[in-house]
Image: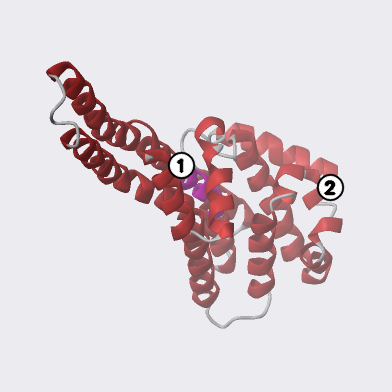
Amino acid sequence: MIGGAAIGAFLISNDFSGVKHTIKDVGKVFKGPKWKKQDYQDLLCLLSELLRVSRRSPVELEPHIETPSESSIFSEYPRIATDTETVNLICDTLRAGGMNYDDPHQVEEVLDKRIEGNDHHAMHSSHAMQTVADGLPALGIVAAVLGVIKTMGSIDQPPEILGKLIGGALVGTFLGVFLAYGFVGPFAAKIKSVIEDEAHFQSLIREVLVANLHQHPVNMCIEVGRQNTPSSMRPTYSELELALKGSRKDAA
């Protein structure tokens, strides 16, 4: 009864896309964040190549940001290229930066709002599961009350039968609290933690492209991104320099 009521409440309070999103995100509890250390290094290399092309010739950059699926630069980093939102975020920001904005802060503000919107959407599954976790203890109490009602209907029975009925009623409270704080709540917290870790990927894009909008040298823009990469995912300066040299040789 408790499980059925919790699932029913979850389905009623979320639309179909929200349910699919939540079910998909449950896998994050076991898989962890999508982006690994190599992906952060690849992202910095990708941004470096795009920025160098844009500084050399904005016309040469246009095919890469208009049709990224056919871009020779994006194709070098298939894991990033298959993430539609990441690719669109990079391309849209570079396109906006090339529109001769008088104030680069305008692009920065748009970028901030977009990333904030992405984060809000990504957190839906965590909030949905936390809502279920918050309601499970109350559902356990409801089950316990029903058990007590059933017990009162058998009040003329001997103590050994009443004890069994009362024990069954208390199991409802136990299960509600146990499922809330032992399973669903921790799942919601883990999903939130993983989503927050994944959000650093888009934040890195923001830092590099905003630095570019302010016309800092490309090397400095990439170093700003490296410094803002989470410590557990951050490549060392020498590792990144070696990877950047390799990408330049490939481009040549």
Could you tell me which secondary element the residue under label 2 belongs to?
helix
- As drawn, which residue projects farthest toward the bottom? 102
Looking at numbered disc 1 in the image, what kind of residue is underneath it? Ile
Percent position of residue 101, x then y: 60, 81
Q: Is residue 61 above or below residue 202?
A: below
State the extent of the magenta-drawn residues as a range: 193-202
- Identify the residue under disc 1: 191
Residue pictured at 86% horizontal, 47% vertical: 252
Percent position of residue 168, x then y: 26, 27
Residue pictured at 64% horizontal, 35% vertical: 38
Count of marks overlaid on the render:
2
The label on residue 79 is none
- Identify the residue under disc 2: 251
Looking at numbered disc 2 in the image, what kind of residue is underneath it? Ala
Residue pictured at 51% horizontal, 62% vertical: 115
Residue pictured at 41% horizontal, 53% vertical: 9
Horizontal arrangement in the rendering, residue 135 relative to residue 129 (left or right): left
Using a 10 Å C-alpha cutoff, classify the residue at mark 1 as few (fewer than 14 neighbours), some (14 to 19) or many (20 or more).
many
Could you tell me which secondary element the residue under label 1 belongs to?
helix
